[in-house]
Image (tube, coloured by chain):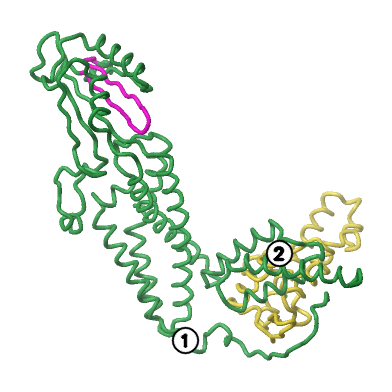
Chain colours: A green, B yellow
Amino acid sequence: MSNNDSEEATNSTAARKLERRYRRVLRVYPAGRRREELLDTLLEMAPPSRAWPTTRETADLVRRGLRARLGRPASRAVVVVAVMVALVTGYLAAAFAVRGAWEAVPDYPSGGKLAEITGTVFPGLQVDGSRDAGGLFHDLDEPSTLDVVRHGHEEDFGYAEYNFAPAAMYIADDYHTWMTETARRLTEAGWTVQDVSPTGATVIATGKLDESGTTLTADRGNLHLYVGAETDVVGTPVGSFYADANLTRMPAWYVPAAGALGWLAGGLIGWLLTGWASRRTERAASSRVRALTTALTGVALFFLLPLAILGLLGFVDEFWITRSPGAGPFWSLGVTWFYGCQQLGTLLGLVALVLAAFARPHHSLLPDETTKTTSKIKNQSPARE
Amino acid sequence: MAKPMREPTFWILTALAAEPRHGYGVLQEVSRLTGGQVKLLAGTLYAALDRLTAEGLVEADHDEVVDGRSRRYYRLTSDGATALEAEAERLRLSARTARQQLAAGRPELGPALGRTAAFPKLGRLA
């Protein structure tokens, strides 16, 4: 084989690789002739030395391809709708992803491990304790699955906790001294004490705190500990204070990671679904089908979008700002106060999708029949014009 | 009054004004007409062609298959030609106003500012 032949073979292999790489990027466009048209243009534009699509080119293709998936090229409204739908589907997917990831988080300690914690907080005292629910969440009403499906959860729905306190309820000591000692014991046992704060009623006239107790929070591993000492609980003997504590599980790193992936994957699915429905109804034979699908999507978004926006803010707050599991999961509004909105919005969204699935394209508006075209075949290698 | 065209739209319509062209042909023509100052990316070009087709300013002319790859030629519609003409007139008036203002502020440069040779790009736009 001559040097020229060898060089030609190398160039041809490189060109095929570049074509394959372009084809991979072009999958972002909806299937159809546009991919081939773009491939032709991209290969014509590429200098002989190019082995990979450039970053600028790829970013442009991804952006324009995602837009092309929505159809209706002259409409800006379809982009706004797609962003809103993506937020909603991202929210729903993130809720399921986070719920699933919690299953892998270690459960509350029991037996000797639990006794070590309760003994460190209340040494030398008999301690009573219990979980407020067997599963990941608690609901004061303890509803059946059917009740939950019909009505959602009650307003205090949140993560289950392990509550414990001295069986005698009161500790005969000065609460300041006791809490200082408790912080020392916890630190020695490997806990990181986060905060010790006074509690009590605020005097309205002066704005000052009328201190009557103190609280402590500490973390160790995936556990968050709260300890409270209070003197103004009814029935507290003089010289004693009322004490209680609870443990809550903290999410492992993979819980917010699963949530973030859920937002992205769900958002992408929502975008693609909007595109699919938009392109089907864009060519729908019946204008009534188009109008009904649009109206249903609008009403569904009216019910779901506020939940998705609040959910996004709650997600960031739950895992990166307050990092407190006490407020309940970021999606709790959708199963408590706004349960009906969430159910109705989801139902209407699904009906809109079903309508889009049954929308029959208008024959004269099929993509390749919009204009009269003539075809001719050229058997020539692509030449730069 | 119609909205001013974005620059890529203006140049794509201009590139199609003389004859139908396929995607790469449009990109080459835009580059030639602007002296290489406007270089469109392929994704941007086809997004604009889709939009202009939906707006009725451009339409498919004919297809070719070269080396197994589809190549579609696009042409300007009569609405497209009207829109391009209107935009060219708008740019001409804008350029004239700018030249008049410049001449009023700097009378010693007045005659030179009137010549398109002094502002080749402006002259071409107008």
**Residue drawn where x is 78% and y is 57% of the image:** B98
Residue A215 sits above or below residue A368 on the image: above
Can you say which quadrant of the picture contains the N terminus of chain A? bottom right
How dense is the environment of label 1, judged by Cα within 10 Å: few (below 14), some, or many (20 and up)? some
Range of residues picked out in magenta: A210-229
Asked if the residue at tag 1 contacts the one at tag 2, i.e. Cβ–Cβ closer than 8 Å, the answer is no
Give the prevailing secondary structure in the magenta stretch. strand
Relative horizontal placement of residue A261, taking residue A345 as reference (left or right) = right
- The percent coordinates of residue A35 (x first, y second) are 63, 74
Q: Chain for mark 2?
A: B
Assign a secondary structure to mark 2: loop
Residue A169, visible in the rendered structure: yes
Can you say which quadrant of the picture contains the C terminus of chain A? bottom right
Name the amino acid type tagged 2.
Leu
Q: Which residue is the site of mark 1? A: A362
- The percent coordinates of residue A10 (x first, y second) are 81, 67
Relative horizontal placement of residue A342, taking residue A173 as reference (left or right) = right
Name the amino acid type tagged 1.
His
Q: Which residue is the site of mark 2? A: B41
Residue B5, visible in the rendered structure: no
- The percent coordinates of residue B16 (x first, y second) are 74, 77
